[in-house]
Image (spheres, rainbow, N blue to C red):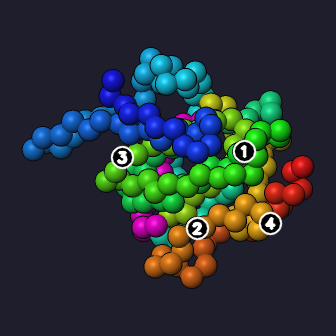
């Protein structure tokens, strides 16, 4: 199997380490293989691929899509680095409001699977970062939602030190509500 799947403290959120096969020409790696993902318990079909380009210190999120268009995501960095965060927003979940963060870089090749019903955000740690993600549902504006990046209840430690004093965020993301409004 060309992937190593590791569980995180939040059920359903998986760290995926693809195997790189390299030589003096470069490398080759599989980034998705349905049969291997099925064996790991990820039985999703992907409907949309996205590519984000950002400078250092950009924070995007925390975004989600609500049912019936809830999106699962398979995310990775192809150039640069991000601090990537998944937040459980599934009502009634024993881990509701808990989050998991991990550094994804072009060097480590690590991917993260974030199930439907979770919020997602990332902070770019390097200039010229290219971030790719596969989504299980197409973007549906009527289902678009989010939680403010610095929500007190979530208490996410974004690694801003040495990156930027305050993250660069969009007007839309700056006006996202706090977690308590989702209850």
| Image: 148 above or below 90 | below
- In percent of width and height, residue 177 lies at 83, 61
Visible in this render: residue 168? yes
In the image, the segment drawn in magenta is: 125-135
Q: Quadrant of the N terminus?
A: top left
Q: Which residue is mark 4?
A: 175
Instruction: Name the one closer to the observer, 70 or 51.
Output: 70
Task: Give neighbour class at mark 3: few <14, some 14-19, many 20+ (Cα, 10 Å).
Answer: some
Left or right, 5 with respect to 113, comes to left
- Depth check, mark 2 against mark 4: the one in front is 2
| Number of the label disc, if any, that sits on residue 95 | 1
Residue at point 76%, 46% (across, down): 96
Residue at point 39%, 55% (across, down): 105
- Depth check, mark 4 against mark 1: the one in front is 1
Q: CA distance from mark 1 to mark 3?
A: 27 Å
Left or right, 12 with respect to 32, comes to right
- In percent of width and height, residue 104 lies at 44, 53
- In percent of width and height, residue 49 lies at 54, 37
| Image: 43 above or below 53 | above
* Secondary structure type for disc 2: loop
- Depth check, mark 1 against mark 3: the one in front is 1
Visible in this render: residue 138? no
Q: CA distance from mark 2 to mark 3?
A: 20 Å
* Secondary structure type for disc 1: loop
The answer to which image quadrant residue 89 occupies is top right
| Number of the label disc, if any, that sits on residue 109 | 3
The answer to which image quadrant residue 70 occupies is top right
Q: Main secondary structure of the magenta part?
A: strand
Left or right, 34 with respect to 152, comes to left
Q: Earlier in the sequence, mark 2 or mark 3?
A: 3
* Secondary structure type for disc 3: loop
Tag 4–tag 3 contact (CB < 8 Å)? no
């Amino acid at each position: 199997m060309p992937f190593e799947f590791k569980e995180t403290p939040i059920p359903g959120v998986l760290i995926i380490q693809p195997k790189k096969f390299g030589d003096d020409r470069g490398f080759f790696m599989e980034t998705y293989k349905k049969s291997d993902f099925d064996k790991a318990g990820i039985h999703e079909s992907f409907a949309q691929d996205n590519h984000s380009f950002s400078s250092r210190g950009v924070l995007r999120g925390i975004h989600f899509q609500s049912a019936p268009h809830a999106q699962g995501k398979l995310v990775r960095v192809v150039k640069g680095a991000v601090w990537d965060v998944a937040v459980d927003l599934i009502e009634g979940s024993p881990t509701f409001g808990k989050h998991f963060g991990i550094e994804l870089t072009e060097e480590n090749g690590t991917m993260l699977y974030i199930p439907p019903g979770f919020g997602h955000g990332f902070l770019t740690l390097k200039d010229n970062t290219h971030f790719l993600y596969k989504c299980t549902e197409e973007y549906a504006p009527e289902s678009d939602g989010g939680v403010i990046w610095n929500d007190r209840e979530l208490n996410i430690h974004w690694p801003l030190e040495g990156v930027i004093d305050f993250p660069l965020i969009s007007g839309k993301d700056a006006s996202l509500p706090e977690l308590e409004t989702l209850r």
